[in-house]
Image: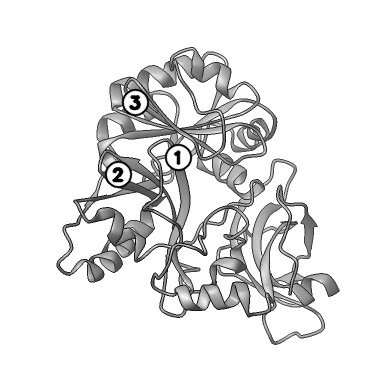
Amino acid sequence: MNSAWETFLQNNGAEFDGGQTVVSFGSLRRELSMALTGTVFADLSQLGILAVRGKDAATFLQGQCTNDVVNLAESHSQLNGICSPKGRFLATFRVFRDGEGYLLSMPRQMLEGVAKRLQMFIMRSAVILTDASDQSIRLGVSGPAAMTELSALISSLPSAVDEVVRSGEYTVVQIPGVQPRFEVHGPIAAMQKLWETLNVRAAPVGTSAWQLLDILAGLPVITPETTDAFVPQMVNYQLIGGVSFKKGCYTGQEVVARMQYLGKLKRQMYLAKIQSDAAPQPGNDLYSPADKEQSAGKIVSAEPHPDGGYMVLAVIQIASQEAGPLHLGSSEGPVLEFAELPYALATPA
């Protein structure tokens, strides 16, 4: 994290986890509640930025990523990811243009591994990979008045999900959410000014509150605990615009395409709530009483809910989810209470 930005956050009441993640601004439960109904803003330093530049950047990424990078316009961003040869996600990220290059936004703990993986395939391509995480500051803004509050300082804003607008020193990306939601990127002085503007009528929140909004939006995030565990369709990536089935070959493409056109979808991702004393963790197994030994699914992500318990995204066998109930950790563990995602699930073949 930029040291000057870290000092700025501390001076504004941020409490850190000992690393680069803001836990809260004094009251986690209040912030979680505010995130569900009010207008809030969050530091996004937990996200890293991998810059991919060079005259071959577009064609290089096209051969590695699940989505169509070549046809990505400057005015849009896209969900994307890279797979193993077996078609399983090694990482997920959001991509948008940066001049002639591309910026890949992902959890910081995933950046080094993604860079090493991509570096293996550069060979003679004119491509340079750079950790650009500290070259800009990033804020998330969400809520019913998000656009109004941002427009007090930024003259032009995106009007649709995935749209990107560059206005002065700011780059603004609209992202999915149960309420209007934006990511704003910019230099530190401009972002400090934005923070002070937002802090009049909106509330700062910690990382958990922001990631709760990701979960409620049904946005999967691959972490070290779940890397190489899921084919894209298992985390609903084809339903939220993260996979192109027309772009041609990429690593793992044959497996992903076969699942789409010839296979039978046996697992998909669900939204659920778990009343548990211990926080569910990515990669935790789920079990059905009908089979106490064999895992029926895995947690993708989890965050606390202001009313207690945890909201989770979980990849689960469709047959097991339909039969129910499902439990965390063992066949006698806490029960999953399913909720509706903001998009329709796929119909199994």
Q: Counting residues from the N terminus, which is met first, the one under dot 1 or under dot 3?
A: 3
Q: Is residue 306 left or right of residue 199?
A: right
Dot 3 alpha-carbon crowd within 10 angstroms: few under 14, some 14 to 19, many 20 or more: some
Name the disc covering residue 76, or none.
Answer: 1
Element assignment for label 3: helix
Dot 1 alpha-carbon crowd within 10 angstroms: few under 14, some 14 to 19, many 20 or more: some
Question: Marks 3/2: CA distance?
Answer: 17 Å
Q: Nearer the viewer, mark 3 or mark 2?
A: 2
Dot 2 alpha-carbon crowd within 10 angstroms: few under 14, some 14 to 19, many 20 or more: many
Amino acid type of the residue tagged 1 in the rendering = His
Look at mark 2 in the image and give the residue it sits on: 133
Quadrant in the picture for the N terminus? top left
Quadrant in the picture for the C terminus? bottom right
Element assignment for label 1: loop
Q: Quadrant of residue 111?
A: bottom left
At horizontal 59% and vertical 33% (from top left) the residue drawn is 27
Amino acid type of the residue tagged 3 in the rendering = Phe
The image position of residue 164, as x and y in percent, is 44, 34
Look at mark 3 in the image and give the residue it sits on: 8
The image position of residue 127, as x and y in percent, is 19, 57
Q: Is residue 102 above or below residue 127?
A: above
Q: Is residue 304 left or right of residue 54?
A: right
Question: Marks 1/3: CA distance?
Answer: 31 Å
